[in-house]
Amino acid sequence: MKQPNSIRLIQNYFVVLIVVWTAGVGGSLIWTIDTAKNNTLITALAQGRMALEKDKMFRRWASIHGGVYTFTSTTIPNPYLSHIKDRDIHLPDGRTLTLVNPAYMVRQMYEFNKDADNVKTRLVSDKLLNPVNEPEGWEIEALKQVNKTGKEYYEMDKRDAKYEFRMMAPFFIEPPCMKCHSFQGYKVGDIRGAISVVTDISGVIHGEKEIKRSAYVGHIILYILVLILFRLGYLNIVRMLTRLHDRESVLDSAMSRNESILQSASEGIFGVDRLGSVTFINSALSKSLQYTAEEIVGKSHILLTHKRDEQGMPVESSDCIILKAIGTKKPLNSVETFVRKDGTEFFGEMFASPMVVDGHSTGAVVSFFDITDRMAKDTAIKKALQEKDILLSELHHRVKNNLQIVSGILSLQAEAAETSGQSLDDILKNAQSRVMSMALMHDCLYKSEDLSTVDMADYFSKLIDYYAVTFTHTGNMIRFETDIEKIDLPISSTITCGLLINELVTNSIKHAFAETEYPAISISLKNDRGNAVLTVSDNGKGLDENAQEKDSLGMMLIHSLTDQLYGKLSFENKNGLTITISFPIRIKKS
């Protein structure tokens, strides 16, 4: 049987508790062992320093008194003090006294104590008066460290089943020492040498081991006892939770049967209490609105729906059909706007059925179907019918206007032909190009999706293909270059712009390339802060400034069409002719 979450949670708690307890016991054991080690070191240091202080005390006493004299019958005169003239004193009775300086006295004390078991001390130096004081074994490295740092040096070692603590401390030249050692070049404060101390700490180490052994045993026993208590407590808690879980399982089984019926429904269903707060939701609602039960239950049903009237305006809560169904105890339905968690909306046909117990409404069960697609299709059909009427009217209007433009162009062409002396072929070709520019514009317009804008890049491509087939220059193809930005021009401007481009391009084709070997025409259309900038340039001979105002049909149309676009016209003769026309993309009507 699957364990309830509460039992798994208790397991996790006890695992964490055991980990914490293990860490605490382990930390306590480590601290106790470390403390025992530190106590051993402290005790060994205390023994060594006590021996050092004793030797320093003897040396200081001897130094203060300038050394002591003893009979030569017991003490051999120190040969290393022969430079002192009063080293030996002869008494009247024939006996002789010899000077025992502090170093000589302490060394004799060391020799006297050399067979001691617990503490052994010795004087060592790297500037020897007496070879006996030369360091040996571990003392060599220890003396180097003492001379280098001026501090104590110590270490532990096991030898012959005994534990030794070795220590060495520097001793410094003091004023009384200069009497015997000034000739060696020492100054007051210099390190003269060091005193090595070796103490037997086997007893201390034994005590440390006993403390460690007791710590291990005590901590292990305590650790196991507490683990047993944890285990007993865990079993009792799990037993209680298991009985509680079994009782809940019976209740959950009955509720799950009812829940499965609710969740298997394909429509979104939710329940509300008499105040409109959501009491449950099914999986279909959770899926369609992207909410979980935890995010909805207990909150107002207004979170799920926008209460709107037929005009889309918010309605009073008293007009909400859910609250109406609860108040009237009658089922009601309407079309509502539902809101998903991400803020998107959709239309749903909602049915609210009151729940009546003992004649009193306790809430309502609400179901709904998503009818967004159906409403979208209805809206699309209505829009299509409206657009059909508008397009038929617009089609007749545009055809009428464009036929009038064609008629006007042909009239102007006929008048110009009487005075220009052009051939019939040229006249017809000019008229053809102007009419074709309008025809291509209509072709692009009727292929567009919304019938209100034209893909100018596509239009220019078709227009250039037409020019390439219709016009040539001395047998050479004219090279066209285009740089067209995507600009949505009003339909009224696109027809005018097409005629204007035709006049500019045909003007270059007919008049610019009389002496040009490789003719080329560049066309660009740019958006400059709300203005369309149309530029047509060629690499021909350019245009005479006086010809800009000639009363030719082409120039008349260029100026007239520019005025229709409320644009500005400019000419530039540089490596050919460049004509720039700037006009507003959207014309503000007063």
Image: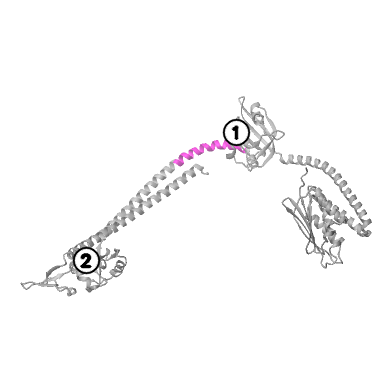
Q: What is the crowding at mark 1: few (fewer than 14 residues within 10 Å), some, or many (at least 20)? A: some
**Residue 464 shows which numbered tag?**
none
Q: Amino acid at mark 1?
A: Ser
Q: Amino acid at mark 2?
A: Pro
- Segment tinted magenta in the rendering: 237-260
Tell me which label, 2 or 1, sits earlier in the chain: 2
Is 252 within the magenta?
Answer: yes
Asked if residue 516 is positioned above or below residue 309 in the image, the reply reads below
Question: What residue does disc 2 label?
Answer: 175
Q: Position of residue 407 (x, y in %)?
A: 90, 50
Please tell me in which quadrant of the rendered image residue 538 appears. bottom right
Is 259 within the magenta?
Answer: yes
Q: Is residue 128 visible?
A: no
| Quarter of the rendering occupied by the C terminus | top right
Q: Is residue 471 visible?
A: yes
For mark 2, give the secondary structure.
helix
Residue nearer the viewer, 520 or 37: 520
Dominant secondary-structure state across the stretch colored magenta: helix
Q: Position of residue 87 (x, y in %)?
A: 14, 72
Residue at image location 86% in from the left, 47% down from the top = 401
Would residue 436 appear left or right of 31 to someone viewing this image? right
Residue nearer the viewer, 40 or 514: 514
**Residue 277 shows which numbered tag?**
1
Asked if residue 370 is positioned above or below residue 459 in the image, the reply reads above
Would residue 129 appear left or right of 311 to someone viewing this image? left
Say whether marks 2 and 1 touch (CB < 8 Å). Answer: no
Would residue 434 appear left or right of 574 to someone viewing this image? right
